[in-house]
Image (cartoon, rainbow, N blue to C red):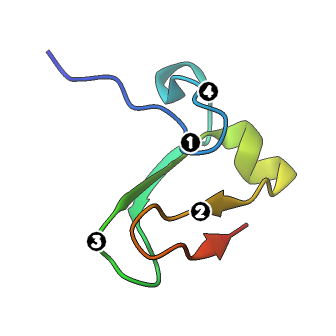
């Protein structure tokens, strides 16, 4: 069974939201960033817990 993934910003279970994505931090590459489709569309900022990079 696959573990659930939650948006790094709003903590929503991304399995229930369309257009969600998972990627490594574009600055350090060490941390997995999870973005739900809603936060992506609204460009809600996220912050990498490792290097504190902030992205839209």
Q: Which residue is mark 2?
A: 47
Mark 3 residue element: loop
Q: What is the number of the mark on residue 36?
A: none
Q: Nearer the viewer, mark 4 or mark 3?
A: 3
Say above or below: 11 vs 7.
above
Mark 2 residue element: strand
Q: What is the number of the mark on residue 30?
A: 3
Given contact means CB atoms under 8 Å apart, are the residues at marks 1 and 4 in contact? Answer: yes
Residue 53 screen position, x and y as percent: 56, 76
Residue 55 screen position, x and y as percent: 67, 71
Say above or below: 9 vs 27.
above
Q: Nearer the viewer, mark 2 or mark 1?
A: 2
Mark 4 residue element: loop
Residue 3 screen position, x and y as percent: 24, 23
Badge 4 or badge 3: first in the primary sequence: 4
Q: Which residue is mark 4?
A: 17
- Mark 1 nearby-residue class (10 Å; few <14, some 14–19, many ≥20): some
Which residue of the protein is positioned furthest toward the left in this rendering?
Answer: 1
Q: Nearer the viewer, mark 4 or mark 2?
A: 2
The residue depicted at 43 percent of the width and 71 percent of the height is 25
Badge 3 or badge 2: first in the primary sequence: 3
Q: What is the number of the mark on residue 20?
A: 1
Given contact means CB atoms under 8 Å apart, are the residues at marks 4 and 2 in contact? Answer: no
How far, Cα to Cα, is label 1 from label 4? 6 Å
The quadrant the N terminus occupies is: top left
Badge 3 or badge 1: first in the primary sequence: 1
The residue depicted at 58 percent of the width and 30 percent of the height is 11
How far, Cα to Cα, is label 3 from label 2? 13 Å
């Amino acid at each position: 069974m696959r573990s659930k993934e939650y948006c790094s910003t709003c903590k929503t279970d991304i399995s229930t939201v369309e257009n969600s994505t998972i990627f490594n931090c574009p600055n350090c590459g060490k941390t997995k960033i999870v973005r739900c489709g809603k936060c992506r569309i609204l460009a809600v900022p996220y912050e990498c817990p490792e290097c504190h990079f902030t992205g839209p």
